[in-house]
Image: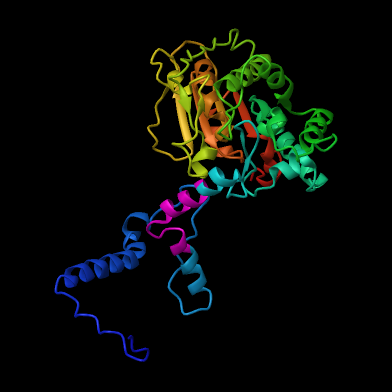
Amino acid sequence: MVDSIALPPVPPPAPDGHRARDRIVALLFAVALAWPAFALIWTGSRTLTRFENRPMAPWPAPALSPEFAPAFDRAFSDRFGGRDALVRFHHGALLRLFGVSSLDTVMVGRDGWYYWLGEDGHSLDRHFRGTMPFPQSEVDGTVAELGRRAEWLAARGIAYVVVAVPDKFTIYPEHLPAWVAHAPPPSPYDRIRDAIARDGRVTFVDLRAPLVAAKARERVYYQTDSHWNYNGALVGYEEIMRAVQGKLAAKLPDIAPARRPAYTPGVDFYSGDLLQMLGMPSRVREDDVAPLGKVLADTSRCGRRIDKDESPGFEIYVCDKPGLPRAVVLRDSMAISLIPLLSENFSRVVYVSTRKLDRALIEREKPDIVIEEMVERSLHAPGAFPME
């Protein structure tokens, strides 16, 4: 018979062998607790997050104030050890399991296409869907500032060309999610282009029609990146240089021919910045139909860089051919693939990552022409950065 009220037997004492195991577990637990702070040795000085592609929250100055604790928490949260692995796991899980983006700035499209929604996450709403306003004051500000720059440059005998590179959703709307509807014209791009034409002071290069025509022959934007590919840059190069030659016919009778890199199927692949932000660069890739790396590796190009990264935001190229003009190019990241093309046409060209025209730079460089390149979503920027 079993005694129903009897106490269960007392287990035997833990063997001595448990001590080593317990110490190992305790040590691993302590390391796990300490690691987020200890890893600040390597991550403490970072300025950009690895995946979100945004500035990290700055470390606050020590102070006895209510703002210090939340500011410190934001800075620590952007840098703690293991953050990259956790963010990658989170992004990857959402993308693989549910097919959705974990970032407000990246949209998952159809057919393996991804779209960048701008720094504030609203460029599609503002420039394509029309669900966010684009004030007339921004149109007027852009036109006024570009005209002001053109007049200042013309007074010094310097030509001026402005080019806007369309966002991917403008050229490839068919791969957007089915629920995305295009607002009826005019778009902000249309309004600014038309206003510049009415003003008459600025030569504006509209690349939309040439790129749409070119995409019928070949892919002109990356599927997994926010930029156009080298094919798209070739289209832009031809249109830009046609406008430049119209300004500098006497100094630039011929445009340097563009070399097309060879694409090797099954060998040339690419994984773009949008996948990097989502933590998936090694898992998803596309055919690199126009490998920019092969262009950059071509040592027979005349244009060569001479600044050696000495000044952040500046790149200087020279081409030792007699009689070539000089140029300054105001640019954003869309011009990266334009640089090896444009540099073949100028004896000296300075590329500046800015939306603001630096008068001192122009006076120092004395270019024959200034080319200002900007992406569609930044068309309002010149008005926000006037010459001083």
Residue 167 visible from this viewpoint: no
Q: Which quarter of the figure has residue 123?
A: top right
Residue 14, percent from left and from top? 19, 77
Q: Which residues are magenta?
A: 75-92
Number of marks drawn: 0
**Which residue sits furthest left?**
16
Q: Which quarter of the figure has residue 213?
A: top right
> Is 39 situated above or below 102?
below
The residue shown at (14%, 74%) is: 16
The answer to if 126 sits in the magenta stretch is no
Q: Is residue 289 left or right of residue 375?
A: left
**Which residue sits furthest front?**
1
The answer to if 90 sits in the magenta stretch is yes
- Identify which residue, 290 or 144, lies in the foreground: 290
Quadrant in which the N terminus is drawn: bottom left
- Identify which residue, 196 or 113, lies in the foreground: 113
Residue 357, percent from left and from top? 61, 38
> Is 295 situated above or below 170?
above
- Identify which residue, 229 or 348, lies in the foreground: 229
> Is 346 situated above or below 49?
above
Q: Main secondary structure of the magenta part?
A: helix
